[in-house]
Every structure is written in structure tokens, then in C-alpha cells.
Image (cartoon, helix red, strand yellow):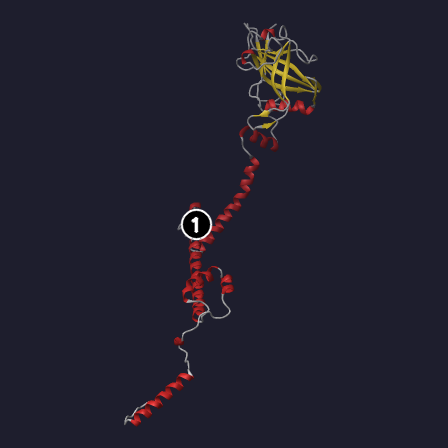
Amino acid sequence: MSDELYYVPGGDDTFVELSSPTGTKLFKKHILTKGPLYYNNKTIDVTDEFLDSVVKNFNDHVVSHVQVPVVDENNVHVEDPFRNIGEVVKLERVGDKLYSYIDVRDEVAAPKMGKTLLGASAMLSLDWKNNKTNKRVGPTLIHTAITNNAHLNDLEDFEEVLTMSAGVRDSNTRAVVLTSTNTVKESNMPMDLDEMIASLRDEHGIDVPALQRVASEAGTYAKLSQDLQSALADSGILKLSASEGEENTAEDIVAAVSQLAQDRVELSNKVDALVADTAKTKAEKRVDDLVATGFITPAKREANLKLLLSNPETFEELLPEKPIVELSNESGNEIKDENHDADVDSEIARLSAFGADNGLTIKA
């Protein structure tokens, strides 16, 4: 009767990787059961969520290597890499039980598993911190230690999954490859649309729904581009192509829009300057009128002009109710001084009389 070696391909959640290239034997070991766990005078409630968290955090690799150390001479868990005999390559939950698949890579320890190395004990963190995210992620398996005096005494024994060291294989040894029933689809059973879309996404990285959305939007983009070209051409900003039916490039449209924006800025600046000049002219006339009527002194003209331009309300509030400057008689108005006129006439009369007495004639 020939020996048969069973190889299970990876890449499917229904399979377990049997061993790394350097492995020797793979063992399945029951390490935890749902229910209360009594440890160091504390009760830990191992729930469904607890077990699922341990499996999830293992699959997420929050612990880089879940090793398999042998406890020290005092039956104490250690993380000494020189006491490590392998690595946990998978966690599997079956009902209320959690199993650890151990790839035993130490060639000396491998033949002793389940014979003189009899049991295993899991080291768990109740709330492990993921160093990648700096966040707590809940219950996590740190390592599975080999011990002959485990804390839990109702665990199942080691179960060897496959011997990878075949020793000396003779010509009768036959290798059998195991596959799941849905690995190969019969050629006479074509995929439906949903299966095809899923296959393109998962196997080839092609997102069909996204491509469909882009295709549906292409017509909108084309119309927008055409309308934009027409509007720019009508405004004289964009010159249409000389060739019949040939459209401007995206670079042409971008340049035209940029030119349109630049022209708008220049026009806006000119308008702002014109408005500013008009406002200044009006303010100067207003201040000059107030200087002429005595409400503002000439020395304060510039200061009042700046205030009127920057804060018209304050300017109006500070204006006096009456003129503060006494206007000069040389302002252009006719001023009559009746007393002065009387004195002049009297002096003329006196001088005329004096001239007559002395033989002189005085003409006014």
C-alpha cells in the first residue's frame, strides 16, 4: 500500500497553510473554550466576542510573530526567542472552541510533540495596543507556549495535521492535491453578470460599476466642453480651429479661461481706480468749500480730506455748527464803514476851508 501526502493550496479561507518552507510538522491544538476563565483570583468571561476578537487580531497581524516558546524550568511563560520552536500560522474557531495551528520548525522538538511535549498554554492580552495605530484592539493572542502543566486542564491533545518531513520516500509515495468544490467552475456553466463583475474586481482589480459611471458622465463632460468653447469663441477670447470640425484642445480652453480671468481683473482694477478718483475729487471740493466758508482752517485741509475719504460719518460729526474762522474784508464783498466815511467828508471840508482862506483851491 502506497503512502499519500496531502498538499492543500493556499489563497482560500477554507484551507490552512500546512507549513512554511522551513517547517517540519504542523499541529492543531485546542487552546481556549468559551465560558468563565479563572486566573489569579479573577474571573474572565470568554464570550463569542472575545474569541472573535482573538481571531480577528491574529488575522490583522497586530502581533508581528505569534511564536511558540517552551516554558522555563519553573513553568513560566517566556518570550525568549532561543526557547522558540515554531510559529502559530492560523487560529480557527470551531463552535465554542479556539484552535491554534502550530508550525513546529525545531527538528528536535517536532518528534516530541504530543509525546513528551504534552500540552500548550495561550498567553493572551485582554486589551492589546496595536503599535501601527496606537489604539487598543481588545483580546489578542501573544504566544502559544509549550507546557506539560497548562492552567486549563480540559483541552484537547495535539493533533498532527501533516508530516512535512517525509523522510525517505520510495517510488510508491503519491502526492494528492486537495481543492475545494468551488475552486474550478465547469466550462459549461457560464458566469452570470454579478459573478463576472465580482471576478473582474477580485481577480483583476477592475471596478466595472466605476467604469460605467465614468462612461455615463462622458457625454456631460463633452457637452460642457463644447458649450464652453462656444461661449469663449463668441466673446473673442478663444479662436476656433481653422480646420472644419476640429475642436480646440483642453490646453487652449484653459488658456482662454485664464486670459478671461486676467482681463476681468484688469477691468476691475480700472473701475476701482476710476471710482477712487471720483470719490477723491468730490471730497476735495467738499473740504475746499468748508475752508472757504470758515468751517475748516486751511492748515487742517489735508487732515480733514483724509478723514472724509476714510470715515465720512466721523468727518460729519466733527464739523462745527458755526464757522470757526473770521473771514478777511478782502474776501470780495463790499464793506461799508459809515463812521469812516463821515470822518473823510469832514476832513475834506476842513481842508477846503483852509485853502480858501489862503488862496488855494482843493478838488475832491
Residue 116: % across, % down: 62, 5
Q: Is residue 241 left or right of residue 196?
A: left
The amino acid sitting under disc 1 is: Ser
Q: Helix, strand or loop at disc 1?
A: helix
Q: Quadrant of the N terminus?
A: top right
In the foreground, 217 or 68: 68
Residue where numbered disc 1 is placed: 258
Instruction: Identify the residue at image location x=47%, y=54%.
Output: 231
Q: Is residue 166 above or below residue 195?
A: above
What crowding class fits label 1: few (fewer than 14 Cα within 10 Å), some (14-19), or many (20 or more)? few
Asked if residue 333 can be seen in this view, the reply is yes
Residue in the picture at 42% in, 45% down:
251
Residue 93 on image: x %, y %: 66, 20
352 and 157: which is toward the camera: 352
Is residue 246 rendered to the left or right of residue 80? left
Question: In terms of image quadrants, where is residue 329?
Answer: bottom left
Where 224 falls versus 289 (above or below)?
A: above
User: In the image shown, does 181 or 79 lie closer to the viewer?
Assistant: 79
Q: Position of residue 106 (x, y in %)?
A: 55, 10
Residue drawn where x is 55% and y is 42% of the image: 216
Q: Is residue 186 visible?
A: no
Q: Position of residue 45 (x, y in %)?
A: 70, 22
**Residue 181, placed above or below residue 255:** above
Q: Residue at x 59, y 31 (%)?
A: 198
* Number of numbered discs visible in the structure rendering: 1
